[in-house]
Amino acid sequence: MAHQGSFEKDGIVKEALPNTLFRVQLEDGTLVICHLSGKMRMHFIKILPGDKVRIEMTPYDQGRGRITFRYK
């Protein structure tokens, strides 16, 4: 369940960066820096470039997000 003030978008991971950061291209073409959510770290879900993911963003910072789900 998403936080009250956040919204979710889908994108494709373009690049893996250090410290579990990823560069994700959204469906509208914008690039966003994202980190993994705690549940994904806890369950050792791996993310690779090319994976389709769902990210959660706040309206305050459109350049950052959190990866919450990896599509199969």
Image: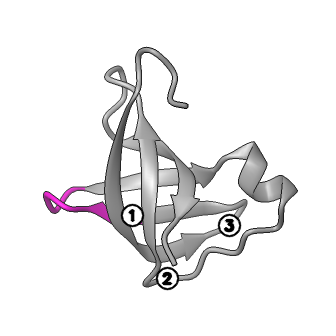
Residue at mark 2 = 49
Q: Percent position (x, y) of residue 48?
A: 57, 81
User: Marks 3 and 1, how far apart in space?
Assistant: 14 Å
Q: Is residue 31 shown above or below 63? A: below
- Asked if marks 2 and 1 touch (Cβ < 8 Å), the reply is no
Name the colour scheme.
one colour
Residue 28 colored in magenta in the image = yes
Q: Can you say which quadrant of the picture contains the N terminus? A: top right
The residue shown at (21%, 56%) is 30
Q: Quadrant of residue 66?
A: top right
Q: Secondary structure at mark 2?
A: loop
Q: Percent position (x, y) of residue 39?
A: 76, 48
The residue shown at (52%, 78%) is 72
> Closer to the camera, 44 or 20?
44
Give the class, few, some or many, for how many residues have Cα within 10 Å of label 1's Cα (few <14, many ≥20). Answer: many
Magenta region: 24-30
Residue at mark 1 = 24
Residue at mark 3 = 18
Q: Please name the amino acid that badge 3 sits on.
A: Pro
The residue shown at (16%, 62%) is 29
The residue shown at (54%, 52%) is 67
Give the class, few, some or many, for how many residues have Cα within 10 Å of label 2's Cα (few <14, many ≥20). Answer: few
Label placed on residue 35: none
First of labels 2, 1 by sequence position: 1
Q: Nearer the viewer, mark 2 or mark 3?
A: 2
Q: Please name the amino acid that badge 2 sits on.
A: Pro
